[in-house]
Amino acid sequence: MKRRIVNAAILSVVGILFVAMVATIPAESVMGFAKQAALLAVGLQKPEESAQLINGWVTQKPVTAPGGALEQQVLLGEVVVQAVTGNVAGAVPEKKAGAGVVLTQQLSAGKTFVEGVAIKNNTKNTVNMTTALRHKPAIPFSSESDAVQVLITHTHTTECYLGYDAGFFNPDDQSRTDDAQKNMIAVGKQVADVLRQAGIGVIHDTEIHDQPYNGAYSHSRKAVEKYLKQYPSICVVLDIHRDAIYQSDGKRVKPTVVINGKKAAQMMIIVGMKNTKSVPNVHTADNLAFGARLQQVAHRRYAGLMRPMVLADARYNQQLSTGMILVEVGSDVNTLPEAVYAAELLGNSLVETVKGLDS
């Protein structure tokens, strides 16, 4: 009887190992897989300048972009199975009445790529991405300079993340906070730290600009203008936000990708293309070229990290400077560790991008 039990156990182990080999997944990770529903998500974002940006393709097959495909991922029918480690969020609270569903999904990196760049053009402008990528933006970055060259700001400073990772959210969970350890300041700090470690001078604006929420862009514009005047060497400006992606049935989407075994919040670059006589924006071509280069680098280095770059019929204060873009890091139901990890990857991509301009 003991021999039969031992033989059965051995056969079971062999069977598991065989499945793992066929699926190209390490055997030690098989029992730790977490399921993700591959449902079509519709992402709804409402920036202050009244531009509604609809985004939300869900990847239906493993990502195989240059720079390394998603680790330990295999398609089983319509369910994506991934091994996930690291980025542990806070303790899971009691699920309360009225709790909603959080869908952890890897949104599509895009459908049509031009040299690693996919866009979602929400303007009436016709954009040639090949031309945009060939255009070297007028950004006078110097790798040898000790001056401040990058400004990081947060128009919607108090945006924050879910404090736990449990597949649900409670109706009283905060989506905004003044706590700099939990809001967008914490995300921006990670990007700034990466830049400083690379020897790049950076100013991180930690002023709260969205109290009140209406008029946040006017408030942050004054801060950007102040820093540009104080540090004329600034040639790159990042306005870092987080998204909010709701489905029509009330479910919230958590755009997530696994990079090197850790969960990262997916990101989206937004370039404001609005240019009027009353408020001219002479930087659209340079900002588009810069955003495209950053998107290209991040896509190559970290497959699946970037959602398609959005071109918006808005300004987002990008008329103030060349090299000024908006970056959405995750959504309100990502966790802060996922967002901070994404910020680290963004910082790495930014370092490569700006140094590539110094040639």
Image (tube, rainbow, N blue to C red):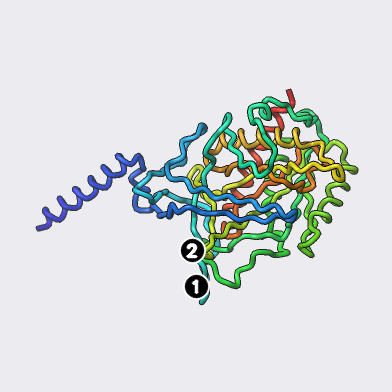
| Quadrant where the C terminus is found in the figure | top right
Q: Tag 1: residue type? A: Lys
Question: Circle 1 is placed at which residue position?
Answer: 95
**Mark 1 secondary-structure assignment:** loop
| Percent position of residue 331, x then y | 60, 56
First in sequence, mark 1 or 2: give its number: 1
Q: Residue at x 67, y 46 (%)?
A: 327
Q: CA distance from mark 1 to mark 2?
A: 9 Å
**Farthest top residue?**
359
Callout 1–callout 2 Cβ contact below 8 Å: yes
**Farthest bottom residue?**
97
Q: Could you tell whether 72 is left or right of 328 in the image? A: left
**Farthest front residue?**
124
**Mark 2 secondary-structure assignment:** loop
Q: Could you tell whether 57 is left or right of 211 in the image? A: left
Front residue of this view, candidates 100 and 166: 100
Q: Which mark is residue 79?
A: none
Q: Residue at x 53, y 65 (%)?
A: 250
**Farthest right residue?**
229
